Each structure stands twice: as structure tokens, then as C-alpha cells.
Image (tube, rainbow, N blue to C red):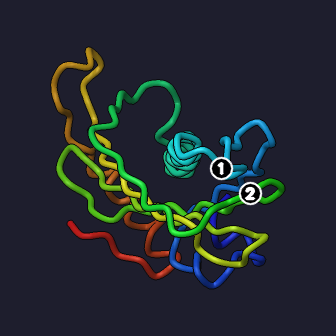
Amino acid sequence: MSATDNPEAPNALAHYPVIHNQPIHWGEMDAFSHLNNVVYYRYAESARIAYLRALGMFDGSMVTVLAQSSCQYLRPVTYPDTLLLGVRCQRLGTTSIVMEYSYYSCAQQAIVATAEAVVVRLDSDGKDKLPWTADERTRLLELEEKVGHAPEL
């Protein structure tokens, strides 16, 4: 879902072009009844796929690899809740993209975590880096521009 298609998106996610809606499931809690830390990475993966789909780049022909990821936990999340994950491009490189995520808790009405990931594009063999095409770069920048965000180039 894009931010421009979601009139109920919170102001905290106003400059994120894609917002992934993620319900929390009971089985994702840890022993302390908090959302397990590894689940945040699964949610980021789903949001990343939603972003690539919004760009028309997730059709099975593109090979990407996750080169780095990190998550900063700001508040515990408990069941029941729904997270809205804002995802955007922080920096667009020649063969990579740095993606930025904000996890918004509907129950807490606040950002509960932030994350970052570096995704590298590879050739069809998955061995060598492959540059983003001019068309792909244009589509990405146009998507980001719709919400008033400009990634670093």
C-alpha cells in the first residue's frame, strides 16, 4: 500500500511512499510477552518486498541480496497490535539501495522501532553486482517524490 493511497496513515509516516500493514500474531511473542526481536526483521522483509512491488521490480527477474540490516527497538510491542511499517529509500547507489523503515504501533500511536537495510542488486547468476537501470532509478525517485522525500544519490 502506498502512503498516498492510505488517508489514515499517521503523520509520523507521511514521508514514506510505501506503508506495509502488519498485524501482530500471538505466536510471535517472546518469553516476556514482547514481540520477538527476530520478527522485526521478517516484517522489514515483507515491507521491502512491498516497496519493490510498488516499483514493479518484484517479478522474479531481479536478483537482490541483503548485505546489511539493523534494527533499533524503541518501545516493546505486545499482542494484540498492528504495526504500520513505513519504508523508503534513504540512499540510492549505483548497485545498492539503503532502505529505511519506521515501525508505527497502532495501539501505542507511536514509532516503536526503526531499521535500516542495504540491498545489493546482482546479475542473474547472483555473482556480480548489476547497476540499477535509468528507468528503475527514475521510477524509484518518482515514487519517493510523491511523498516529498528525496533519497541521497
Image location of residue 82, percent across then percent down: 76, 59
Q: Which amino acid does label 1 sit on?
A: Leu
Whether residue 8 sits left or right of residue 128 in the image: it is: right
Residue name at image x 26 percent, y 44 percent = 132
In the picture as drawn, the residue positioned furthest to the top comes out as 125
Q: In this view, does 77 lie above or below 6?
A: above
**Circle 1 SS class:** loop
Image location of residue 91, percent across then percent down: 27, 62
Q: In which quarter of the image is the N terminus?
A: bottom right
Residue name at image x 67 percent, y 62 percent = 84
Q: What residue type is labelled 2?
A: Thr
Give the labeled residue for mark 2. 78
The reply to whether dot 1 and dot 2 touch (C-beta < 8 Å) is yes
Q: Residue 133 carries which label?
A: none
Residue 92: quadrant of the picture = bottom left
Question: 10 Å neighbourhood of mark 2: few (<14), some, or many (≥20)?
Answer: many
Whether residue 59 sits left or right of residue 32 in the image: it is: left
Tell me the distance, in whole angstroms, between the alpha carbons under discs 1 and 2: 6 Å
Q: Which mark is residue 35?
A: 1
